[in-house]
Every structure is written in structure tokens, then in C-alpha cells.
Image: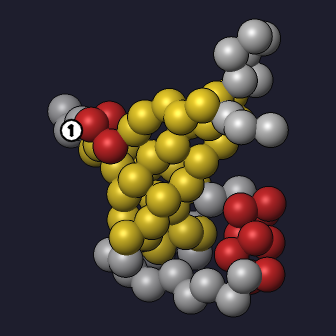
């Protein structure tokens, strides 16, 4: 069993990538974040990994290990 995780990049993430004119490349460093709306302690869940194109689904994903996941305070 591997400790390498993958998450597919959703439509909103891909729209941001396109809007910002970012070119994804296989193996390129990639940082993604998602809002964790826990009441009284809002934070960002941040994962650092590498970009990977799933050839069967033709969909980009981020490959990462749990060592590269952290929570950061959200500043409004």
C-alpha cells in the first residue's frame, strides 16, 4: 500500500488555472488548497505535490503524500 494520494482537480480549480493562464505539465510542482469551514476556526487545507495527467480519464490531478498536507489559518 502506498502513502501517495491523488485528488482530481475539479471544474472550479481548472477554471482558475485557465483564468490565471497557468500551464499544467506532468511532474510540475503544484499547490492546492480548500477551505475548511469549521465553526470558530476557519482554515485552509493546503496540499503540495506534483501535477499528473490521468491518461484514461484525461483529467489532471495532484499527487501528494500526507507529509505534504497542512492547515493554515484563514485571514478574512
Image quadrant containing the C terminus: top right
According to the picture, the residue beneath numbered tag 1 turns out to be 2
Residue 19 drawn above or below residue 9: below
Q: Is residue 63 something one can see in this rendering?
A: no
Residue 1 drawn above or below residue 5: above
At a point 50% along the width and 31% down the height, the residue shown is: 71
Is residue 9 shown left or right of residue 35?
A: left
Residue 22, quarter of the rendered image: bottom right
Q: Position of residue 74 (x, y in %)?
A: 68, 35
Q: Position of residue 9 (x, y in %)?
A: 62, 59
At a point 53% along the width and 34% down the height, the residue shown is: 72
At a point 43% along the width and 34% down the height, the residue shown is: 70
Furthest-top residue in this view: 40
* Disc 1 packing (10 Å; few <14; some 14–19; many ≥20): few
Image quadrant containing the N terminus: top left
Question: 35 and 51: which one is in front?
Answer: 35
Is residue 45 shown left or right of residue 43?
A: left
Q: Is residue 75 something one can see in this rendering?
A: yes
Q: Position of residue 61 (x, y in %)?
A: 51, 61
Furthest-left residue in this view: 1
| Label 1: element kind | loop
Is residue 26 shown left or right of residue 20?
A: left
Question: 75 and 62: which one is in front?
Answer: 75
Residue 34, quarter of the rendered image: top right
Amino acid at each position: 500500500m502506498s502513502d501517495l494520494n491523488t485528488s482530481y482537480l475539479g471544474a472550479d480549480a481548472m477554471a482558475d488555472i485557465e483564468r490565471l493562464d497557468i500551464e499544467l505539465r506532468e511532474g510540475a510542482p503544484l499547490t492546492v488548497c480548500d477551505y475548511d469551514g469549521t465553526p470558530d476556526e476557519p482554515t485552509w487545507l493546503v496540499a503540495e505535490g506534483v501535477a499528473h495527467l490521468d491518461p484514461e480519464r484525461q483529467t489532471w490531478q495532484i499527487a501528494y503524500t500526507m507529509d505534504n498536507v497542512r492547515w493554515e489559518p484563514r485571514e478574512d
